[in-house]
Image (tube, rainbow, N blue to C red):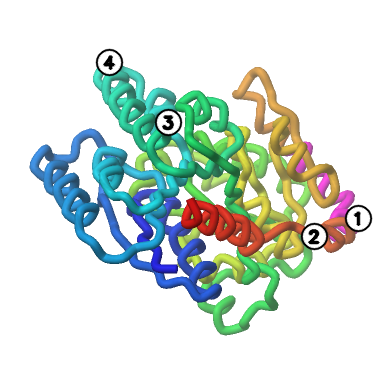
Amino acid sequence: MNILLVYPYEGDQPVRKIKLKRALERKGHRINEFLVATSSEPGMGVIRRIQLVFRSLMTAVQKRGYDIIHIIEGWPMAQFPFLISKTPKVYDVRSHWAYLIRRERPGRKYRIWAWIIEQVMKLLVRHCDHTTIVDPQIAQSVLQMRPRSWSFLRNLPEKDFLKPPKATQIERLGIRGSQNGLVFGYLGAISRQRGIKDMLQAWQEFIESHPACRLKIVGITQSNYPFFTNQIQPFLHKLQDTVEFHDPIHYNEVPHFYRTIDVMLVTSKDDHYPLKAGEAIAAGKPIVLREGPMRKALFGNKGVVWYPRVEDEEQEWLAIKGALEKVVVHYDQLQEEVQQIKIPTWEDEVERLEKVYNRLLRQ
């Protein structure tokens, strides 16, 4: 098949594009890429927005012989022009932007912006031939937009995470290990919603009784600096040399990061499918994970130390500290359990997606 992959540049969408492209190319499909935007912020200039929409429109009307157009959710205004194309279209909803804007950007200006984005998303969902939903948490709101047909396309780890590491790539990370204690790891954004402040507050208390343990945090970027400076730096003098901060690593190096740690910390406050937890389990590492109905159903209890949601968020660090203590006590058992887990991979999901493509071509 000749597939046009329409995707945004922001956030973790490039990773999803990389995974999707690699999996489809391995199966012999030809992938053409179309980048719709470099920014999703409402502050983007009007001229730049018009240019992006016009560019999308020109690409949509050109006859290039595409069999399928697969649109990964991004800035909707630059994606809806593809609706005029008669080529079968799949719309991949990752995070439901309107929902995120309402939650993270209070204020009348952003409420209006969220409403506009939601209306354009409805057009895409209703008029694309198939909608794939990544996160079960947003399924209900997406289904209310009445898609023609839909399915889940979970954000699972690739088979690469099951491969043995290459020593040269591990060394390139510049991450050292602990000789006498467990090495805990965190990989992702440095933000309040990811629970990083609670994690460090818990770690500060935890290392008093477990000074040989280490924590490796990968994800410091320039956009994180205000939060890092205001919320994280006050902890640093108390954490001594037990915590290491590292800039983001390339996606191809992520499997090797997991092999430099003993336990993965996933402290995000959202109840969604945490890709990092699935990756860690695929790499054979136990995880510490915040409780949530969807998460419990996905991961069960093997290889996982759960910590409860706390009504008083200021006290959540106590729950994390309790989970860290449990890991130290039960680590051998957790390691044995996680080795027995067989987690589905991204390649399994893409086989289901191929069936969707073939069905659309037969219509």
* Camera sees residue 55: yes
- Answer left or right for 304 relative to 95: right
SS type, badge 1:
helix
Residue 326 is one of the magenta-drawn residues: yes
Kindly report which numbered mark, 2 or 4, lies closer to the viewer in this rendering.
Answer: 2
Which residue is pictured at 46% across the width and 59% down the height? 15
Q: Earlier in the sequence, mark 3 or mark 1?
A: 3
Q: Which residue bears the numbered disc 2?
A: 342
Under mark 4, the amino acid is Arg
**Quadrant of residue 258 in the image?**
bottom right
Magenta region: 321-335
In this rendered view, identify the residue nearer to me: 286 or 179.
286
Residue in view at x 44 percent, y 34 percent = 96
Residue at numbered disc 1: 333
Q: Which residue corresponds to mark 4?
A: 108
Where does label 3 land, which residue?
A: 100
Q: Residue at x 68, y 75 (%)?
A: 163
Q: Quadrant of the N terminus?
A: bottom left
Q: Secondary structure at mark 3?
A: helix
